[in-house]
Amino acid sequence: TPRVFSGIQPSGNLTLGNYLGALKRFSESQKTGQDSIFCIVDLHAITVWQDPDKLTRATRELTAGFIAAGVDPAQSILFNQSRVVAHVQLAWIFNCVARLGWMKRMTQFKDKAGKNSENVSLGLFAYPALMAADILAYHATHVPVGEDQKQHVELTRDIAIKFNNDYGADFFPVPEPVIEGAATRVMSLRDGSRKMSKSDPSDMARINLTDDADAISRKIRKAKTDPEPLPETVDGLTDRPEARNLVNIYAALSGTSAETVLAEYGGQQFGVFKPALAELAVAHLTPISSEMSRLLQDPAEIDRILARGAERANAIAAPILKRTYEIVGLIA
Ligand code: AQP
């Protein structure tokens, strides 16, 4: 049976990229009635040092973000990763299955480590093995993610296949990345060649889900663009990364395609398009941010939601972990 798993790190402010690439699609996949598990991956977040109080706060904020974006914790399972021990236990097994060479090819590690790779945490390097454990601990089959996570899901597939081969067991399903929609890779508002990211030092580069209407409008108005009007067709967006990004954001927010957006705005100046985009983004995002603030007024309730989610998650993962140990020959 199909089962969806996906996670988001509580590593800062949720961005429009996280919303369009992940959250919005999670609530859509839930509507199809699929069995879905959503995880706040706090153990991934600490691969880069996090202030402890901020991490706790970001975990609750992200929980509120999931719910405000439409994930129903009574239907889907919503919990924080560190609460379910199977993730780390399975990650160790996968550290022993994955090869060093596979890890060295991960572009996210190379991007995040930069030139200083001797000095980053071992956890940052091993991150994809933990991510494989997150997914496979539930025998998940579908992983909705943004484009940036595709390589990690492919590594998860390699780990599942190698484990099954190494132990002659047809045990782990080989999961599929699900990357669809108009905005699978939302780019920075300041630089069309870099993805919009929670941890970008420039706040003007991203729209945060908690931004108010003024901030959203200002960031869109100041977004980097070229001086040309919008093209009539999507072919005209080639080599215009900033224009393409804004058109894709408009398409994703309005649930249409870039073609449809250009049918309306092709030939128009950014002076016309940007205010329309700002209005659309404000209409879409401000109800989410006010619902988040409302939920955050009761942190104890958020903690109860996470605790219940973790119990349900553990009930699925614990037997899968036990069977994995037996397959490996560990006395479980
Ligand atoms: N710019 C983006 N466009 C589309 N999808 C995106 N995602 C992230 N950025 C974009 C998707 O959001 C989900 C959660 O991502 P994550 O928290 O696991 O970490 P990330 O991919 O590394 O995202 P960030 O925002 O850039 O975080 P930091 O700055 O902490 O590294 C994933 O499904 C991801 O694809």
Image (cartoon, grey):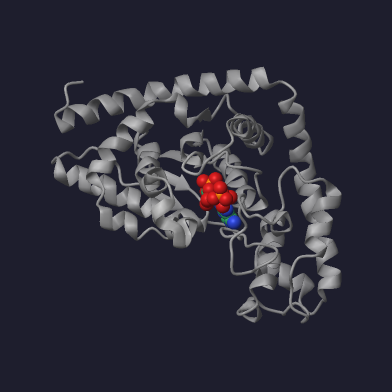
Foreground residue, 263 or 53?
A: 53
Q: Residue at x 21, y 48 (%)?
A: 162
Q: Quick one: quadrant of the C terminus? A: top left
Residue 164: give x, y in percent of width and height.
Answer: 20, 43
Front residue of 257 and 24: 24
How many numbered tags mark residues here? 0
- Looking at the figure, which quarter contains the N terminus? top left
> Measuring 50% from the left and 58% from the top, which residue is drawn there?
147
Residue 55 at x, y percent in the picture: 59, 33
Residue 309 position (above or below residue 120): above
Measured as percent of width and height from the top left, residue 36 is found at 49, 35
Q: Residue at x 46, y 42 (%)?
A: 47
Relative to 244, is 115 on the left or the right?
left
Can you say whether 180 is above or below 135 in the image? below
Rendered position, 132 above or below 270:
above
Q: Residue at x 61, y 54 (%)?
A: 197
Residue 120 x %, y %: 43, 50
The quadrant where residue 185 appears: bottom right
Horizontal side, residue 264 vs residue 105: left or right = right
Q: In which quadrant of the rendered view does residue 166 lie?
A: top left
Quadrant of the rendered image containing residue 255:
bottom right
Q: Nearer the viewer, residue 36 or 21?
A: 21
